């Protein structure tokens, strides 16, 4: 290994060789320590343990293949960034740290020593301006950090026996779990007993199979009979020829002259020994933070948890190591003037990518909501941008239109031409037409937002209903075939009253609701500010945040109560029937109906109710005193009767059963809408 900077002329330093006292090599000292098993474990011989080798190789190769990029923060006050390939450090980190190593080889070397010894070092070679030109890795077993007269220096012993003294700004020092601020802890040093046990087990296994080999079966001759040496050899040869290879597997053995076959099984002691070796593998994997399935132990891995374990490996094992290196590079490799503008960051996107279906579903959500365009998605899939430039356009979900055209694509149904009054009263007719025209214009933006969120909400309800249906059917199968109706209702009641469980069940819907109501609120606040520029929008937004959360929680309770009532009604309808399977059939039919149509109906109800309730609350907090109901000619007598009805903002439009009518919808498919009365 060439150390390009060891022989350059050095600047005058305050710490001299006279300040440094010689010491024993840490590697030599460590080799004198043995574990309770009598085995000495060092960073060098620990790699002879297969599980250690597998863990270190996995972590090192993973870290080495994750791109490390240098970014520049954009000076616009936001969190935006861009790559900085023109900076000298970019090439060093991304391409080649020195003229003899690639970036992959360099970080594999550094990570390997960081895992085995708890420390990794590289010499920093700078140009006259102070920019890093090269990084040369150094052997950590030959390096000894010292603090002398408040100055941190590094004493390095060359292979030829001579030594060299580095200043702190000449060394890139990576530490794992530092305890004194200077040196990092080594897993090998701290876990001598666990690793010594594994090493002793390997040694015992090797000796066992080399010196204590045992046959897998015996052929016994009858008592009182003996075979000559020639007969034994002939019998063994014939047995191997008949049953001793894969082609003869499962053949029936025919034994003559009183011979009997005896299988030799593994003794309990041998079985316990084999089990202990399995434990050693898992124990070492735990020391390095590696899921056991990634080093070949699949005994406790399942199809349902193996993907999540792989993601946890990235989050809890790889990411902390990445952050440690990123921050060390910022502190030790960037000049003071550059540290506020530039920063290094590993690109972990490739490691956390899901399967094809999951990725494409995530891209769809991002594209439909306008925070990714087609070219950005194609870049993540290693594809070139669309040539004509159309991939740079950001779109929204309603029918994939440019964002600057939102609000212009929805045209509500034509309002009723019927003036419902004296046609000779022209001023009143004109006033009503003007009022309705304003209502149509203001409602158009809300309806456009509603259409944008409709597919997202329907997808969210679909996932919720699918999970809910499976659980209800599970309850039904365990109780209703044996006519345990009361037990079924008890299970259903406990299910829907389990707050945390229901919150988790409905999280796709409530998350989408929060986003939708925030969008409606923003639209209405904009309208209110145009109507009254002096309005304190900030105070209204603060109050609306808690109102919106209460609305979401209220809908969660309404949804679960509706589900519970439908199931109770299904059971009630089967009370007088003799067929013990009728209750199960009725519940199954109800759940099937949920799967077929409930997502769409709940979406319509949810969006329309949230739209009307939230808009009305924003108007009330903005000082509006009167609101008016408008229909779009659905043919519903009740809706037609309410068309044009004006009430105070605190009032109601009537009652429906035990509920006050505060806003649309009155029924499934209702397309009525509210509007505030201007000028009051």
Image (spheres, grey):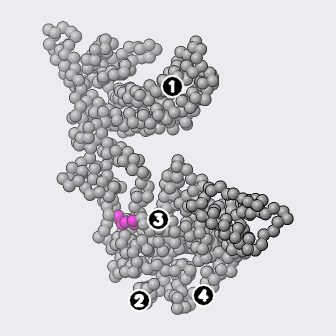
* Relative image position of residue 653 (x, y in whole percent): 36, 16
* Relative image position of residue 300 (x, y in whole percent): 60, 53
| Vertical position of residue 488 compared to residue 367: above or below | above
Residue at 57% across, 21% down: 581
Residue at 40% across, 63% down: 345
**Secondary structure, magenta segment, majority class:** strand
2 or 3: mark nearer the eye: 3
Q: Earlier in the sequence, mark 4 or mark 2?
A: 2
Specify whether 51 is left or right of 366. Answer: right
Q: Which mark is residue 425?
A: none
4 or 3: mark nearer the eye: 3
| Residue 141 vs residue 530, the one in the foreground | 141
Residue at 36% across, 21% down: 668
Q: Earlier in the sequence, mark 1 or mark 3?
A: 3
Q: Which residues are magenta?
A: 67-71
Find the distance from the CA under tag 1 to the CA under tag 4.
Answer: 83 Å
Find the distance from the CA under tag 2 to the CA under tag 1.
Answer: 83 Å
Q: Are marks 4 and 2 in contact (CB under 8 Å)?
A: no
């Amino acid at each position: 290994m060439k150390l390009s900077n060891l022989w350059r002329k050095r600047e005058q330093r305050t710490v001299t060789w006279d300040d440094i006292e010689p010491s024993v090599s840490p590697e030599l000292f460590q080799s004198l320590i043995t574990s309770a098993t009598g085995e000495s474990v060092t960073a060098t011989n620990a790699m002879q343990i297969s599980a250690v080798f597998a863990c270190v190789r996995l972590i090192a190769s993973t870290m080495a293949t994750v791109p490390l990029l240098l970014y520049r923060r954009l000076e616009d006050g936001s969190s935006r960034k861009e790559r900085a390939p023109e900076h000298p450090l970019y090439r060093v980190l991304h391409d080649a740290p020195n003229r003899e190593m690639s970036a992959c080889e360099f970080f594999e070397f550094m990570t390997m020593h960081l895992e085995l010894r708890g420390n990794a070092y590289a010499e920093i070679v700078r140009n006259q301006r102070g920019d890093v030109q090269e990084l040369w890795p150094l052997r950590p077993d030959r390096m000894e950090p010292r603090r002398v007269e408040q100055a941190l220096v590094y004493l390095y012993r060359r292979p030829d026996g001579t030594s060299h003294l580095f200043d702190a700004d000449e060394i890139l020092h990576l530490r794992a779990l530092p305890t004194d601020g200077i040196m990092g802890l080594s897993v090998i040093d701290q876990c001598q007993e666990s690793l010594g046990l594994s090493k002793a087990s390997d040694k015992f296994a090797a000796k066992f199979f080399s010196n204590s080999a045992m046959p897998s079966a015996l052929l016994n001759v009858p008592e009182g009979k003996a075979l000559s040496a020639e007969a034994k050899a002939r019998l063994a040869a014939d047995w191997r020829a008949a049953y001793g290879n894969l082609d003869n597997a499962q053949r029936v053995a025919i034994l003559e002259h009183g011979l009997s076959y005896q299988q030799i099984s593994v003794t309990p002691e041998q079985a316990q020994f084999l089990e202990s070796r399995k434990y050693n593998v898992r124990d070492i994997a735990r020391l390095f933070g590696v899921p056991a399935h990634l080093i070949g132990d699949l005994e406790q891995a399942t199809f349902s948890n193996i993907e999540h374990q792989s993601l946890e490996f990235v989050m809890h094992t790889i990411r902390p190591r990445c952050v440690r290196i990123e921050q060390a590079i910022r502190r030790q490799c960037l000049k003071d003037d550059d540290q506020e503008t530039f920063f290094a960051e590993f690109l972990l996107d490739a490691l956390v990518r899901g399967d094809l279906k999951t990725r494409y579903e995530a891209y769809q959500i991002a594209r439909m909501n306008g925070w990714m365009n087609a070219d950005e998605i194609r870049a993540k899939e290693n594809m070139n941008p669309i040539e004509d430039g159309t991939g740079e356009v950001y779109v929204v979900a309603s029918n994939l239109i440019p964002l600057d055209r939102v609000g212009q694509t929805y045209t509500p149904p034509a309002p009723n031409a019927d003036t419902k009054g004296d046609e000779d009263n022209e001023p009143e007719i004109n006033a009503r037409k003007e009022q309705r025209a304003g209502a149509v214009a203001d409602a158009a933006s809300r309806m456009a937002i509603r259409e944008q969120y409709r597919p997202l909400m329907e997808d969210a309800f679909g996932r919720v209903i699918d999970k809910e249906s499976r659980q209800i059917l599970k309850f039904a199968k365990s109780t209703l075939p044996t006519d345990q109706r009361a037990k079924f209702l008890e299970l259903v009641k406990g299910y829907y009253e389990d707050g945390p469980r229901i919150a988790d069940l409905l999280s796709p819907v409530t998350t989408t609701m929060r986003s939708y109501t925030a969008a409606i609120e923003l639209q209405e606040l904009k309208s209110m500010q145009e109507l009254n520029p002096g309005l304190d929008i900030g105070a209204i937004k603060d109050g609306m945040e808690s109102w919106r959360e209460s609305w979401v929680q209220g809908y969660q309770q309404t949804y679960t109560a509706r589900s519970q009532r439908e199931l109770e009604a299904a059971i009630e309808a089967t009370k007088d029937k003799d067929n013990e399977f009728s209750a199960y059939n009725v519940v199954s039919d109800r759940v099937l109906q949920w799967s077929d149509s409930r997502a769409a109906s709940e979406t319509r109800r949810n969006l329309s109710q949230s739209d009307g309730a939230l808009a009305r609350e924003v108007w009330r907090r903005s000082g509006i005193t009167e609101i008016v109901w408008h229909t779009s000619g659905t043919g519903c007598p009740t809706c037609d009767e309410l068309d044009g009805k004006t009430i105070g903002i605190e009032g109601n439009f009537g009652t429906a059963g035990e509920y006050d009518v505060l806003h649309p919808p009155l029924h499934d498919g209702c397309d009525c809408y509210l509007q505030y009365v201007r000028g009051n």
